[in-house]
Image (cartoon, grey):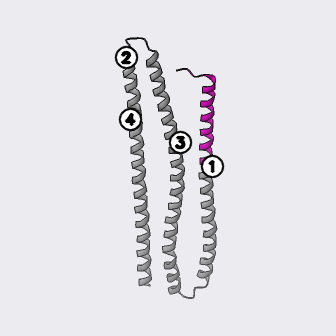
């Protein structure tokens, strides 16, 4: 299959638009990360000031232990929440990239099949077996890509479930430790 200059230009334009779309998606992801980190920094500084004031007003060791125990649980929960936000931003950006890759791959597969079909129509008599072989190879490549896509999606789902489980376990462990410290105090 030969491309006309208009088809070639349209294909190039589509690729440039895809590139700029991906660049925009990447910048949006970075922007979200910066916003998240700025908010965490702002909140941390404010909490540090409050904690410092509280620590300076402590009158005895028992009060200091109580203050310390009260800080443990919220810190773990905040770290877990930060990790969750970070994961969500990364997963969202990755999903956009994956969507574009899948669309681009689907278009490439269609183009390859169209080229094979055009070549078969214009092929000399007696080349049917070679054309069938090429079609089979393109189909096998398409099937392999789809299998890899499914495996990647399953791996992402397993990673998501594991991340959730680890986060929940860490928060529960911190809550238990905080209660134990308060009880001992």
Range drawn in magenta: 1-25
- Give the alpha-carbon distance from disc 3 to disc 2, as whole Å: 35 Å
Q: Earlier in the sequence, mark 3 or mark 4?
A: 3
Q: Position of residue 116 (x, y in %)?
A: 45, 23
Mark with earlier residue (2, 4): 2
At which x and y percent is residue 149? 42, 42
Asked whether residue 15 is drawn in magenta, I would say yes
Residue furthest out toward the front: 121
- Residue ID for mark 1: 27
Vertical placement of residue 79 versus 102, above or below: below
Residue to which mark 4 is pinned:
143
Residue topped by disc 3: 100
Residue drawn at the location 50% of the way across and 32% of the way down = 108
Seen at 49% across and 65% down, the residue is 80
Q: Nearer the viewer, residue 80 or 178?
A: 80
Is 55 placed left or right of 123 in the picture?
A: right
């Amino acid at each position: 299959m030969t491309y006309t200059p208009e088809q070639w230009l349209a294909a190039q334009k589509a690729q440039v638009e895809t590139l700029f779309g991906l660049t925009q998606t990447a910048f949006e992801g970075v922007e979200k990360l910066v916003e998240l980190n700025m908010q965490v920094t702002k909140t941390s500084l404010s909490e540090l000031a409050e904690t410092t004031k509280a620590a300076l007003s402590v009158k005895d060791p028992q009060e200091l232990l109580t203050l310390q125990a009260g800080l443990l649980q919220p810190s773990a929960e905040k770290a877990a929440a930060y990790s969750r936000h970070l994961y969500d931003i990364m997963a969202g950006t990755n999903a956009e990239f994956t969507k574009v890759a899948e669309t681009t791959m689907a278009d490439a597969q269609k183009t390859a099949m169209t080229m094979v079909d055009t070549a078969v129509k214009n092929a000399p008599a007696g080349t049917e077996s070679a054309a069938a072989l090429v079609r089979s190879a393109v189909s096998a490549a398409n099937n392999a890509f789809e299998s890899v896509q499914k495996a990647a999606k399953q791996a992402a789902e397993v990673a998501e479930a594991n991340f959730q489980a680890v986060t929940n376990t860490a928060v529960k462990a911190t809550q238990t430790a905080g209660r134990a410290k308060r009880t001992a105090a």
